[in-house]
Image (cartoon, rainbow, N blue to C red):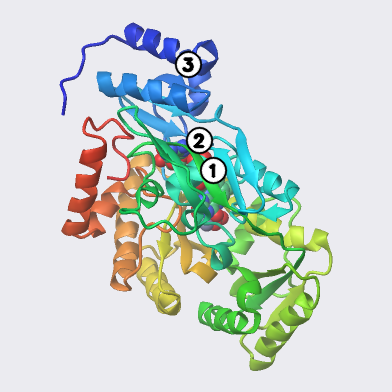
Amino acid sequence: MTAPMSITHPQLFQRLHAAVGDAGLITDAEGKEPFEVDWLKKWHGRSCVVVRPANTAQTAEVMRICHETHTPVVTQGGNTGMSGGATPDGSGAQVVLSTVRMNAIREVDPLNNTLTAEAGVLLAHIQEAAQEAGRFFPLSLGSEGSCTIGGNLATNAGGIAVLRYGNARELALGLEVVLPDGRVWNGMRGLRKDNTGYDLRDLFIGSEGTLGVITAAVLKLYPRPVARSTAWVGAESIDALVQLLAQMRAVCGERLVAFEMMSNESLELILQHVADVRAPLGASHAFHALIELADTQGEGLADLLERGLGDALEQGLIQDVVVSVTGAQTQAFWKIREGISQAQVRAGKAVKHDIALPISAIAAFASQADAALRAELPDVRIINFGHLGDGNLHYNVLLPLGTPGEELAGTTERLNRIVHDLVAAANGSISAEHGVGQLRRDELRHYKSDIEFDLMMRIKQSLDPNQIMNPGKLI
Ligand code: FAD
Ligand code: 2HG
Ligand code: ZN
């Protein structure tokens, strides 16, 4: 580690100002405030300044200054993260580096099926640009109108189409990254085969701003689906939905794009707290699934869906189903699914678990975890929903809105231990798609093996010797 250069705040501002100009610097409290609190309003911090570089060269200059002066940097994209990864700490010493001005789509190459975008481009804009080129970019999240592709890559985001297309990691071919010392790594290759040593791209994807600033990416495009067919299903157990998932995969193959699950308690919460939604089925069921098929051919998709679900009805795997017949009905199904985060914010304080399990272990996990939580807190509200097709559950617990901070912290610790011990016993992961951030940093240390943690620390130390990249997050 090099010795820190002694610098005062005004000197730092002067140097950063020279790097990014008036439009790139926010120093007043009111202007900085939106960058200092997260989407859930759970984490509040204080920054010394918000810098908004307009391009890679400016980002490199900002990082050079921060490296030299040992100034900690918190990179922020759309600030929609759910793990507190983009919020500065309370010291007032950290720089927030916002990528929102790096928002150009540099190139679309329809023959190579790639799109090259800067880190601050909104996910929804990438989807639109792909569509304009007659192609499809499949990453899809409830937050797609506000999150950035840089944030998606930094968290290795998942969402509702992972089952068919994979996580953000699978959708990136190349990256450009500004390293903590201000050097620029140009890995902007649009190649599907490239075995030239260690995979640096995969190192930065999912590193949550702790190893460098992603400034641009080459993304994979796909043929545009022209038909989609969607159904809402009611079942009496998660096990039945797991069986249904296996059957639908066998029947529909690659056309099965989304298989989302929610418990009845989750559905009730949404119906209560989100405007203009209604239950898709007449009767109540313990579990529900939202299933979507898509295809680049227009023919036969609805028949396939109906065949798969008809068989499941006959076998008694599911009790009821409604297949959407209009675009409006499809949208209404998705509006219910996408209302879940907002419903939780309105209804209480959520203790969030973003877990991944082998799909075959989900039913046993859920019954053990339900029983263990009820033994700990008899009136517990379990909001269990998620991307069943990927084995990713948001196995959340909702505590009352007025729960005092200290009690919340204590209960969270107890509930985390119960849930995460069961996850570990099933060989699962405590962090599936939202990132570790500050929310799960201590949990990560608890569950990672010493050897894995040691390797991670060595990588961190070699890339960021001054420990300035997003301190207190992830590692
Ligand atoms: P931010 O919140 O700004 O940052 C997230 C992390 O990435 C931080 O650690 C930050 O330091 C780092 N970071 C951001 N940009 C860069 C960069 N350019 N270089 C290096 N590090 C960077 N997530 C899912 O995976 N699946 C979902 O289905 C999903 N649904 C959501 C629904 C709602 C309503 C909301 C509010 C959030 C949802 N999320 C979901 C969480 C969130 O949207 C994702 O984590 C998203 O990828 C974050 O992108 P962002 O641009 O907002 O990143
Ligand atoms: C989703 O799947 C998001 O809707 C958000 O990942 C999950 O609110 C949550 O816990
Ligand atoms: Zn999710």
Q: Is residue 367 left or right of residue 24?
A: left
Determine if the C-beta at disc 1 is less than 8 A from ligand 1.
yes
Q: Which residue is mark 2?
A: 77
Q: Give the labeled residue for mark 1.
A: 149
- Are the residues at dot 1 and dot 2 in contact (C-beta closer than 8 Å)? yes
Q: Secondary structure at mark 1?
A: helix
- Kind of residue at disc 3: Val
Which class describes the residues within 10 Å of circle 1: few (<14), some (14-19), or many (20+)?
Answer: many
Q: Identity of the amino acid at label 1?
A: Ile
Q: Position of residue 211 (x, y in %)?
A: 33, 39
Residue at mark 2: C-beta within 8 A of ligand 1: yes
Kindly indicate the quadrant of the structure image that contains residue 243.
bottom right
Q: Amino acid at mark 2?
A: Gly
Residue at the image position 40 percent from the left and 48 percent from the top = 201
Say which mark, if any, is on residue 24: none
| Residue 93 visible | no
Q: As rendered, which of 48 and 124 lies closer to the eye?
A: 124
Q: Position of residue 30 (x, y in %)?
A: 52, 17
Q: Which residue is mark 3?
A: 20
- Whichever of callouts 3 and 1 sits on the residue coming sooner in the sequence is 3
